[in-house]
Image (cartoon, rainbow, N blue to C red):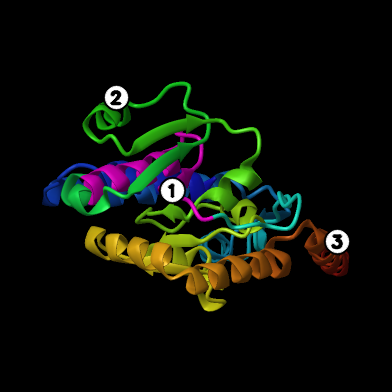
Amino acid sequence: GLHNSDFVLKYNFEKKKRNFLHKQIFKLKLKINNYFYRKKVRGISLNLCPSQYFGKMNSILFKNRPKVIYFNHPARDLKKNKPVYKKKKQKIVSLIGTTQTTFAQANIDFLIDELLTKYNDELDEFEFHIVGDCSNPSKKLLTATKKFRNIKICGYVDDLFDKIISSDVILHAVRFPPTSGYKLPNICSCHPCLLLHKAAFQGFPEIFKNKACLSALSGKEFVGKLKILTKNKSLSNKIRQNARKVYEKYYSLDNLPKILENCNNMIYKKNETYKDWN
């Protein structure tokens, strides 16, 4: 889909320094990518897009052919019991997501390049946990674990709810708007203390508007916000509570019947219009 290929193109492009010619070629690649994507969906009656950000993008791109219905990504509730926030000696910051995906790799790259490489001396009291399938870690990540002792590869965990609750902060430092498939909706069900890149606002404005996170732009800002969240427990607990409320209002599977009803009404309306034309 566009929301995946568009992001991968942009991310891989931004990872390297480019001159003017490279930028023009890149713009052409995006146009070609969008052209074939638009052409491929012409025969579809309805496009369901579980992303507010990319749903609006598809609506503009498709020009109502097909009709686009977009909504917040429904997610399974991972909550098992009442959360208990335990105070620990070490401050745990978790990055969640399969490391082979472009998105999770972008998060890890920011941690290594913008936080640890530049501000590691200020982060001695923090331990950064890489959570998710890590069966084939990148060379960059393996090198970083040898250079920075406060990176820990946790891999797959049996109880994600417990891992999120026991983490002081969940870090999502990706510079591009998140795709619909990212785990933030799932994570929100677990009372997380979220620290997001400001670019995430475009994909998940409801998290920001409901004060369910803190956000930052530069590495220096992220370091400052990490310190604030781990020292101010009242603020941290409030963010956790708000994140759960956001899940219940926007991402809960209980919203699915209403989404499906809207889809059904849209299809019925389109079929009726088609009959009138004939």
Q: Which residues are magenta?
A: 87-116
Taking the magenta stretch, the answer to whether it contains residue 23 is no
| Residue 183 appears in view | no
Q: Indicate which disc, 3 or 1, sits on the residue closer to the N terminus.
A: 1
Taking the magenta stretch, the answer to whether it contains residue 113 is yes
Between 147 and 89, the one lying in front of the other is 89
Q: Amino acid at mark 3?
A: Pro
Alpha carbons under labels 1 and 2: distance apart: 23 Å
Q: Indicate which disc, 1 or 2, sits on the residue closer to the N terminus.
A: 1
Task: Please indicate whether residue 217 sits to the left or right of residue 264 in the image.
Answer: left
Alpha carbons under labels 2 and 3: distance apart: 44 Å
The residue wearing badge 2 is: 139
Task: Please indicate whether residue 59 sits to the left or right of residue 245 in the image.
Answer: left
Residue count near mark 2 (Cα–Cα under 10 Å), binned few <14, some 14–19, many ≥20: few
Label 2: state its secondary structure. Answer: helix
Judged by depth in the image, the label closer to the viewer, 1 or 2, is 1
Label 3: state its secondary structure. Answer: helix
Q: Are marks 2 and 3 in contact (CB under 8 Å)?
A: no
Residue 257, label in figure: 3
- In this rendering, the count of numbered labels is 3
Name the image quarter holding the N terminus: top right
| Residue 256 appears in view | yes
